[in-house]
Amino acid sequence: MERRSLGAAALAVGAVGLGCMPMSWAYSASQQRGDRALRAVHAALDAGVGLLDTADMYGPFTNELLVGRALKGRRAEAFVSTKCGLLVGDQHIVANGRPGYVRRACDASLRRLQTDVIDLYQLHRADPEVPVEETWGAMAELVSAGKVRALGLCAVGARASRRTGSRTHDGTIRQLERVQQVFPVSAVQAELSVWSPQALESLLPWCAARGVGFLAAMPLGNGFLTGTLTPGQGFEPDDLRARHPRFTAEMMAANQPLVVGLRRVAERHGATPAQVALAWVLRQGPQVVPVPGTKRAEWAVENAGAAGLTLTERDLAEIDRLPPPRESWD
């Protein structure tokens, strides 16, 4: 698989990563079996996927434990990315950016992952009660201590601008500019897909201009762009899509033209809509690495195949002409 470089640390990773969250959290996790998830990780590694993305909050903690089990005997093949900064309670998820907590969280992640170093340690969310520079400074100390190789920041997502009503990443960019003064940012993780292209407007150009890697979260639109979901099909109660406004029957029906367009391009290449959606993300820049989440080995292999799919200018123009995605606030 093609290799891509992340940030000033020049960390080389496969062009397509693997999001591990669905294996134990947020997508009907109660029905999953650990052996299936292990097969998915191993199949991804066999296909050349190196970047495994997890977080301590997924589960919480169970996802890191699973990744640690999967990497026994295969740690050298993997690029491990995990996150800190969010605590999961019975009713709420809260941010914690206190330096002491960051240090303890890193040590706990290292134990669960059964490794002596985390390749990319990401701040999941900034704590509004703690200056982000203090949190980032504690994370930088982990690099100096040899526990972490590089640092990244997760963007909450594009927010609606009060002035224009459009979706913007301005707040994320302000955070990035602050922490960049403390220690280099190697990667930013934010949503990017045909369904959700807002990062193209300002966040991705910011990263490109500074040599910062970009991990494209949800590049398949939480599964919608695979073409395997039908409007009104319903989801299990513990599946996050059961409560997400994008996955109402009305919104899924309104956005079907996106899937139809991806399938049309896919048919010309003997590919799947998911592979076309990932190939489109890959074409957004040489520092962009899509991180599709899955819990099945066959889908992990299919996603990896997108790295070998080259979209033509005709394909890209056709995708650009697709109707803009509908959102619940339209």
Image: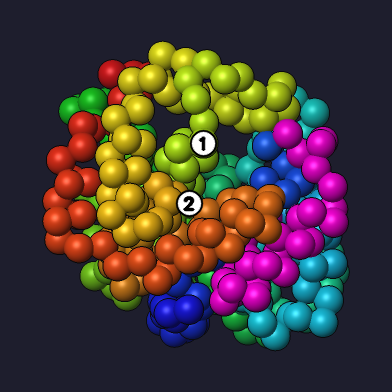
Quarter the C terminus occupies:
top left
Circle 2 SS class: strand
Is 98 contained in the magenta span? no
> Relative to residue 143, is residue 115 drawn left or right?
right
Query: Which label sits on residue 228?
Result: 1
**In this rendering, does residue 253 appear at all?**
yes
**Looking at the image, is 248 positioned above or below residue 209?**
above
Is 38 contained in the magenta span? yes
**Residue 121 x, y percent position in the rendering:** 61, 67
**In this rendering, does residue 103 appear at all?**
no
- The residue tagged 2 is 217
Dot 1 surroundings within 10 Å: few (below 14), some, or many (20 or more)?
Answer: few
Q: Which residues are magenta?
A: 28-55
> Relative to residue 207, is residue 64 drawn left or right?
right
At 23% from the left and 32% from the top, the residue drawn is: 324
**Looking at the image, is 75 positioned above or below residue 80?**
below
At 68% from the left and 52% from the top, the residue drawn is: 296
**Residue 257 x, y percent position in the rendering:** 29, 30
**Looking at the image, is 38 positioned above or below residue 244?**
below
Query: Which label sits on residue 155?
Result: none
Q: On the image, which quarter does residue 250 sit in?
A: top left
Alpha carbon separation for disc pair 2 and 1: 19 Å
Mark 2 or mark 1, earlier in chain: 2
Amino acid type, residue under disc 2 in the picture: Ala
Amino acid type, residue under disc 1 in the picture: Thr
* Nearest to viewer (mark 2 / mark 1): 1
**Looking at the image, is 58 positioned above or below residue 176?**
above
Q: How is the image coloured?
A: rainbow
**Residue 42 x, y percent position in the rendering:** 72, 69
In front: 74, or 8? 74
Circle 1 SS class: loop
> Relative to residue 129, is residue 329 drawn left or right?
left
